Image (cartoon, helix red, strand yellow):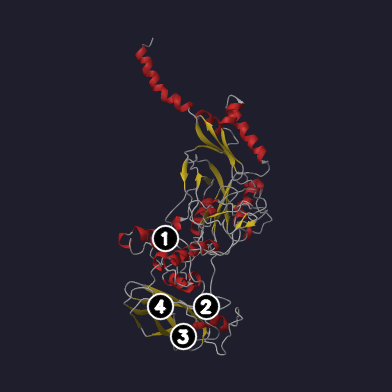
Amino acid sequence: MMNFHSSLFLLLLLLPLLVSTTEKQVYIVYFGEHSGAKTLQQIEENHHSYLLSVKETEEAAKSSLIYSYKHTINGFAALLSPLEASKLSKMEEVVSVLRSHPRKYEIHTTRSWEFAGVEEAMKSSENMNKEDIWLKSSYGKDVIVGLLDNGVWPESESFNDEGMGPIPNSWKGICQTGDEFNSSNCNKRFFFLKGQTVTPHKLQKKLYPLVYAGQVANPDVPKNLSGQCLPGSLSSKKAKGKIVLCLRGNGTRVGKGMEVKRAGGIGFILGNSLANGDELAADAHILPATAVNYQNSLKIMDYIHSSKAPTAYIVPGTTVLDIKPAPFMAAFSSRGPSDISPEILKPDITAPGLNILAAWSEASSPTKLEADKRVVKYNILSGTSMSCPHIGGAAALLKAMHPRWSSAAIRSALITSAGQKNNQGSMITDASGNPADPFQYGGGHFRPAKAADPGLVYDASYTDYLLYLCSIGVKIDYTFICPQHSMGPLNLNYPTLAIPRLRDSVTLVRTVTNVGGSKSVYFVSMKPPLGILVKIWPPILHFNSVGEKRNFTITVKVADGSITGKGEKPYGFGWYMWSDGIHDVRSPMAVSVA
């Protein structure tokens, strides 16, 4: 028989174990994705029935339910003991049971600014007083950003006014709130939003059969299309319960996942083609999915074909930072030359546009597919529409710092200060890994901290643009009379240079305005396109004060012996740059020969 002291000692040893098996904690019970067949009420009743199976009473089951997920995922959050959670995890319909560690997060877009070098400029002690763009711009105070786009959802938390100051006095427009227009109730919160999320534990690895789509395609599907998971192409008998490797090509990315789900697949891998290279676009897939670059796509294909029973497992998604190389030009990015006016080098500049977290309209599913019944507040999007807010925000900061600068001066500062190298120190590439050119990135990747102090700017007035439009036969201001003899579109004071179909030589004039030091001297350097001679005169510019302007001429000539054969030659690229030892004012060039 145990004495009192030994019994007490044993009780003390068992107490932590007893507490750990009975203490209630928050768990998330996950059943997988929604089929869309049940109503929201049916889903909640189903969740309640599972809780009732592990609770002693119906009242205990109801009181333990914290939240029932009905839109994005099928699952619920509840207060459970470890033993109750373990019972639920063993049920066939339950995919996983995760213990929740509630933690408040701030969802934001500030990684864009760190990626663009703004945060680094602030951290550098030598730049604290010189390049602190946030403080110098007062965080863009009293500057209004106008973006023309579609799909705005005013109810989104992204447009919450909390913490924002009053509407600037310079705002003369109107704002829409619901069905009414009101100038005093504008949504002002654009750049930051707050929310909460739950970080799940690592899922237990469960292996699933891994197949290539071509192996589970219906026999009537053409061989060259069998691996692309096009609608109706997969055999339900062969694909059910498997992870399927689908290749990019024809069809939409989310549509391929829809086909895998239709055929009963448990998940899918989207493999890039050679043309897509390293570009990995995040999509709102309707089943567990991942995207891999071209090289990894080949490795997975080789594994499938070289293994008797290839398998794969699904784990929660995580955020991965410092991917290399970055930036690179996405395959969907706009390309030059301009069809309307090839004498203006387009695009002007590039900014982050791939896999950007953005507010989403709750009136549309995240994929916009009819079969997708999910409702989400945020989505990860890709496109030039995602780049525009980055440039708009940078322009707002520059306008706050330099309120007297024109839009042309701000454009010039952004273009001439942009970078052409990635985070590996190499030149920016396209999605396939080939060197990119100014018809893909313009001046380069935007660098707001550099643009805040560009040294020189190429300014242009409203009249300058009207004269340019006259030269290409476009009239937008009928109060302005076009001159009889046009200067030609090449003479618009633009910070870049594009010359299509050069026959012999052309000379044009550019004007730069000093916005740097009061006493400064700039020297020119250049790298002309192959087969092209470029002369800039004068090669040295002296400035005695801020705001002073200096003209220079650029003569572009076809090099002797460089023209062979018939027809127009492809564009060649180069650059010229003014430097004073502190500022590098770089202008890209694109020239084709007729």
Q: In terms of sequence position, does the residue under pointer 2 or pointer 3 come before the other? A: 2
Q: Which residue is mark 4?
A: 513
Q: Which residue is mark 3?
A: 508
The local secondary structure at tag 2 comes to: helix
Q: Which residue is mark 2?
A: 462
Q: In terms of sequence position, does the residue under pointer 1 or pointer 3 come before the other? A: 1
Q: Position of residue 303 (x, y in %)?
A: 51, 51
Q: In terms of sequence position, does the residue under pointer 3 or pointer 4 come before the other? A: 3
> Mark 1 is on which residue type?
Ser
Q: In terms of sequence position, does the residue under pointer 1 or pointer 4 come before the other? A: 1
Q: Position of residue 96 (x, y in %)?
A: 54, 38
> Mark 2 is on which residue type?
Tyr
Q: Position of residue 410 (x, y in %)?
A: 46, 71
Q: Is residue 195 above or below residue 118?
A: above
How far apart marks 1 and 4 lie (CA) works out to: 25 Å
Q: Is residue 522 left or right of residue 171?
A: left
How far apart marks 3 and 4 lie (CA) works out to: 17 Å
Q: Which residue is mark 1?
A: 138
Q: Quadrant of residue 419?
A: bottom left
Residue found 47% across the figure and 46% down from its top: 105
Q: Is residue 209 above or below residue 174?
A: above
Q: Is residue 285 left or right of residue 396?
A: right
Q: In terms of sequence position, does the residue under pointer 1 or pointer 2 come before the other? A: 1
Q: Is residue 305 above or below residue 546?
A: above
Along the line of sight, which residue is nearer the eye, 409 or 525? 409
The local secondary structure at tag 1 comes to: helix
The local crowd at label 1, few if under 14, some if 14 to 19, many if 20 or more residues have their Cα within 10 Å, is few
Q: In terms of sequence position, does the residue under pointer 2 or pointer 4 come before the other? A: 2
- Asked whether the viewer can see residue 534, the reply is no
The local secondary structure at tag 4 comes to: strand
